[in-house]
Amino acid sequence: MIPGSDYLVTGIFGLIVATTVGGALLAVLSTRIIRSVTGLAMCCVGLAGLYYFLNSPFLALMEILIYVGAVCVTIIFGVMLSEPDEPEPQEKRSREALWGGVALLVSAAIFWGVARLGLQGRWPAPAAPVGDGSVQAIGISLLTTYSLPFELISLVLLVAILGALTIAHGGRGKE
Amino acid sequence: MTLHLYDRPGVYLVLAAFLLAAGIYGLIRRRTLIGMLISGELIFSAAALNFMALNRFMTPDPTVGQIFVLFIMGLAAAEIAITLSIIIAVYRNYRSIHSKELSELNG
């Protein structure tokens, strides 16, 4: 083992956590919606790194492929087809500040409660491990144990594609 | 002295809680439909990260959580497709996707 490699891995982990947190903040706080989409993409890249640290390189690849490659690009198409920038606040300043405070309070309470549950909960010690969670094991389980959900999710995706085509198909009004 | 932060489940659980809180803050504060959609995606990601952390540290078979997160990603992709087509249809009808102006059903 190379001396200092622990620090290197911890540094990379810190960088990934910072990417995730920064991306989430950018996605939520920026007023231009295109920056918000960029923040979501950053957050998803960070999540892919976290999945890699959680022993699942397959899911890391899928996260980048599906979220950054498909979801964010689709949202950008939606941004180009509409005018989604945040409007100027029309309410009174005090009311605006009140709603901001309420939102901050609610989300802070949820963060505190869930984080406390996660840190103080008595998690059971894992039983003896079965299987290694490799890509081969995932493929075998998808085609044996989980074959019904696997087929169902493909049906759901097909119906979603057809539904999206039908909803968005109606022609442009002549105005 | 080694830190090994990445081997503790607490870090991932707190991060997932942060993503959930950020998503809920965005859902309350955003005034356009696409902004609310992005916040919803953050909440999806928080759930997926929670599943992966518990899958890595608490369960005997590490395959189950990965498959579940794969299904979450498929459902999120379907949800995005449907929601964006609804948003585009709404924009065609109302020329706006600001949630304040979509108030025809307001009692």
Image: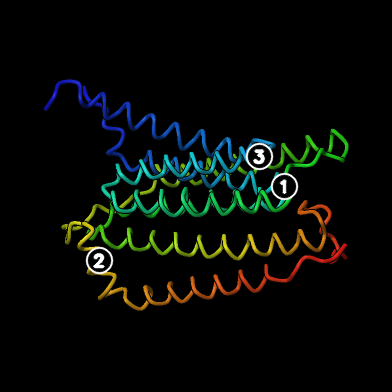
Q: Mark 3: few, some, or many residues within 10 Å (few <14, many ≥20)?
A: few
Q: Residue at x 64, y 36 (%)?
A: A29
**Identity of the residue furthest to the left in this view:** A1
Q: Position of residue B34 (x, y in %)?
A: 66, 51
Distance Cα–Cα, label 1 vs label 2: 40 Å
Say whether marks 1 and 2 touch (CB < 8 Å). no
Secondary structure under tag 2 reads: helix
- Pinpoint the chain carrying mark 1: A
Outermost residue toward the front in this view: A174
Q: Amino acid at mark 3?
A: Leu
Residue A105, disc: 3
Front: mark 3 or 2? 2
Give the secondary structure at mark 3. helix
Give the side of residue A169 with respect to residue A4, left or right. Answer: right
> The disc numbered 2 marks a residue on which chain?
A
At x 53%, y 47%, the residue is B20
Q: Which residue lies under the disc numbered 1?
A: A84
**Residue A10 shows which numbered tag?**
none
Where is residue A164 drawn, in percent x and y?
Answer: 61, 69
Q: Are marks 1 and 3 on the same chain?
A: yes
Left or right: A107 in relation to B74: right
Mark 3 or mark 2: name the one nearer the start of the chain. Answer: 3
Q: Residue at x 21, y 56 (%)?
A: A134
* In front of the other: A61 or A20: A61
Q: Which mark is residue A139?
A: 2
Mark 1 or mark 3, which has the lower sequence index? Answer: 1
Q: Secondary structure at mark 1?
A: loop
Q: Are marks 3 and 2 in contact (CB under 8 Å)?
A: no
Residue A93, placed above or below residue A53: above
Give the left or right position of residue A161, taking residue A7 as reference: right
- Residue kind at label 2, given as amino acid type: Gly
- The CA span between labels 3 and 2 is 44 Å
